[in-house]
Amino acid sequence: DVVMTQTPVSLPVSLGGQASISCRSSQSLVHSNGNTYLHWYLQKPGQSPQLLIYRVSNRFSGVPDRFSGSGSGTDFTLKISRVEPEDLGDYYCLQSTHFPFTFGSGTKLEIK
Amino acid sequence: QVQLKESGPGLVQPSQTLSLTCTVSGFSLTSYDVHWVRQPPGKGLEWMGGIWGDGSTAYNSALKSRLSISRDTSKSQVFLKMNSLQTEDTAIYFCRVSGSSDDYWGQGVMVTVSS
């Protein structure tokens, strides 16, 4: 199975500041069709996860441009600029290139 | 408008079988993939398995021997059955629908395994 190593576990940030979360996979996430199926989710307290970024760098419908995704191969990053209170929660990466699909262990974004 | 709703028993006894239903609306099960994801209290997300638009299935390696996912397209329902439940299977169980650029989640159903 592909292991997704997500860091940091906890990320204190100041409102208006920038946050960066890393996700590294134990093998390349480039599919045989050339696409890379690495996605980012935010789970706010008491809610279901919501998709932020799909296939590395595509913002999902309604997601502000403060969120951006980048990376390739085995190394991926989610950046959040100008952090707002509604950005707080747990962030997860998900790979759906290889079966079984696997999530990262999560990063809790907190206010400093 | 896409909607998903999970349903099932809130309490299951150890060694028994869990049966959950995900009822969907707003799309056809033959056009989208439906997945089950669970989250133990205070812990992270775990992909359990999924059923694709063509009816094929895939499962988490660790759960494969006791998990089955099926569907009834006429009723717009996807089913999860998992046997030999233990206390560590206590979790919120979510169903999730995905397409090429779509992603929807149900509100989840809490399942507690306890005698």
Image: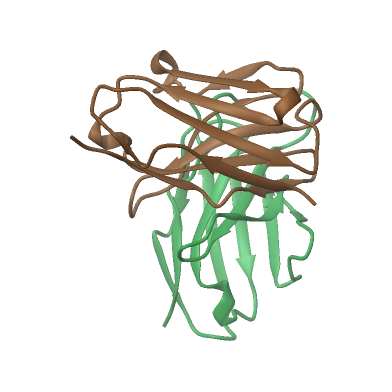
Q: Nearer the viewer, residue A23 or B67?
A: B67
Left or right of residue B47: residue B106: right
Q: Is residue B44 above or below residue A42?
A: above
Q: Nearer the viewer, residue B56 or B113?
A: B113
Q: At 39% from the left edge and 59% from the top edge, which residue is drawn?
A: A9
In the image, the chain rendered in brown is B
User: x%, y% of residue B45?
Assistant: 46, 45
User: x%, y% of residue A77?
Assistant: 60, 56
Q: Nearer the viewer, residue A44 or A24?
A: A44
Q: Is residue A68 visible?
A: yes
User: x%, y% of residue A56?
Assistant: 70, 48
Q: Is residue A97 visible?
A: no
Q: Is residue B25 above or below residue A62?
A: above
Q: At 18% from the left edge and 34% from the top edge, which residue is drawn?
A: B115
Q: At 62% from the left edge and 41% from the top edge, which residue is drawn?
A: B96
Q: Is residue A96 above or below residue A9?
A: above
In the image, the chain rendered in green is A
Left or right of residue B27: residue A28: left
**Quadrant position of residue A82:** bottom right
